[in-house]
Amino acid sequence: MTIEDIKNKGLILLEVISGSKSFGLNTPTSDTDIKGVFYMPKEKFFGLEYIPQISNKTNDIVYYEIGRFVELLIKNNPNILEILATPDDCIIYRHPIWEKLKIEDFLSKMCKDSFAGYAITQIKKARGLKKKIVNPIPKEKKSILDYCFILSGNNSLPLKQWLEENKMTQEQCGLVNIPHAKGVYALFYDTKKILGYKGIMQKDISNEVSVSSINKGEIALAHMYFNQEAYSSYCKEYREYWLWIEKRNEERYNTNKKHGKDYDSKNMMHTIRLLQSANQIFTNGKINIRVSNREELLDIKMGNKDYNSLLKMADDLIASIEKHYITSHLPDHPDKEKAENILIDIREKLYR
C-alpha cells in the first residue's frame, strides 16, 4: 500500500501539518511536514498484510495505522502525543470517529522518560555533531600501517617511518604472532622476494594484519605492535563522519557553520522545546505544542546562545521535571484496557 492508496480509498482518519508549523516555529524557509493516521482495508487487516506505517522517501510525510498509533500513544511517544495535540489550524482532515481519542486519556508520568529521555538523546546527538564539526576527518582514509609501530627499547617508531628509513616495503615483510602478547608480532623481511611472505596487509581495506609462514632459522629484524582497537575505532568514526557528510542538510550545516558555535542549533532548539513541553505536562497536566516563547527558541536556532548555557538551561528544565513529577496527579501510565476498548470500538465502527 502507498500514500496514494490510502487517500484514494478514503482510509485516512487524521491528516495534520506537523513540525515547525504546528509548533509556531516556522520561518519562510521551513518545510511542510505531514503526519496522519489511517486504517487498513478490512480484508488486509484480517489477512496477512498488516502495515503499521506508510511514508514517503524523505519521511517528511508519514501515516500511522490506527493500531500502531494507539500503541505508541500508550507508550507516551512524544511525536505521537504531539500529533494528537495538533492545533486546530494545522488539521487538514479529521474523521468524525477521531473524537474518541482524547489527549487526557494518554498523558501520564511515563512522559518523564519519553520526553526527557528523548531530549537527553538529542543533547548527546548535538555533542556528537559538535565533535564532527570541530574535528573533520580527511577523505583519504588511513590504513593499518598508520596504526603499526616498531618497538625499540623503551620507545617505539611509526612503522611507515621505519620502513622508509630502511628502504623497505610492507609487501616484503612477514609477521609471526608472539604468544601471550596481544598485538605484538615478530617482523621478518624477504630481501629477494622469494620466501612468499604475505606482507603486513594484503589489501587497503584489510582490518587485520597478515601473518606469514616463516622458515626455521630465519631471524626477526624487529618486533611490531598493531593497535587494532584504535584502528577499529578510527574506521567507525570515519564511516560515521562521511555518512554524515553524504546525508547532512547543507543549508542546516551552513547555518551551524555560519554562527560558529560548533553545535547543531536546530537540534538544540527542539531539545529545549521538548523539555519545556514535558515541564508543562507535569506542572499543569496538559500539553500545548504551540509555543509561547517563539522568539527565544528561534534565537537558539540562529545560534545566538552559548552551548554551555543551553546545557545549563536543559539541566534546569530536567530538574524542574523531576521536581514536579513527584507531586504530579497524572497516572503512572495510561489506562491500557481503556485505550484498547477505544481502539476496538473504532475498528468495529469502521469495519461494520
Image (cartoon, rainbow, N blue to C red):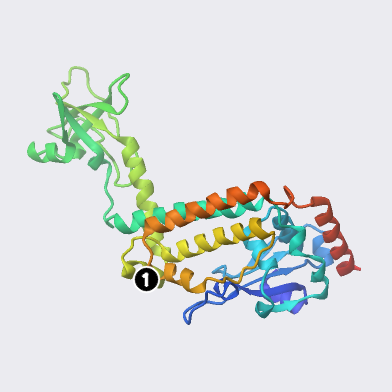
Q: Name which residue type carries label 1.
A: Thr
Against 95, is 271 above or below? above
Q: Is residue 46 in view?
A: no
Against 191, is 265 above or below? below
* Occupied quadrant, residue 185: top left
Task: Please report the residue visible at 49 percent of the width from the left and 53 percent of the height from the top.
Answer: 316
Q: Nearer the viewer, residue 177 or 269?
A: 269
Q: How many marks?
A: 1
Give the side of residue 341 with respect to residue 249, left or right.
right
Against 352, is 112 above or below? above
* Occupied quadrant, residue 52: bottom right
User: Residue 43 at what x, y percent from top left?
Assistant: 84, 64
Instruction: Name the residue that disc number 1 marks.
Output: 255
Q: Nearer the viewer, residue 244 or 202?
A: 244
Give the side of residue 73 with respect to residue 344, left or right.
left
User: Residue 1 at what x, y percent from top left?
Assistant: 70, 68
Q: Nearer the viewer, residue 152 or 31?
A: 31
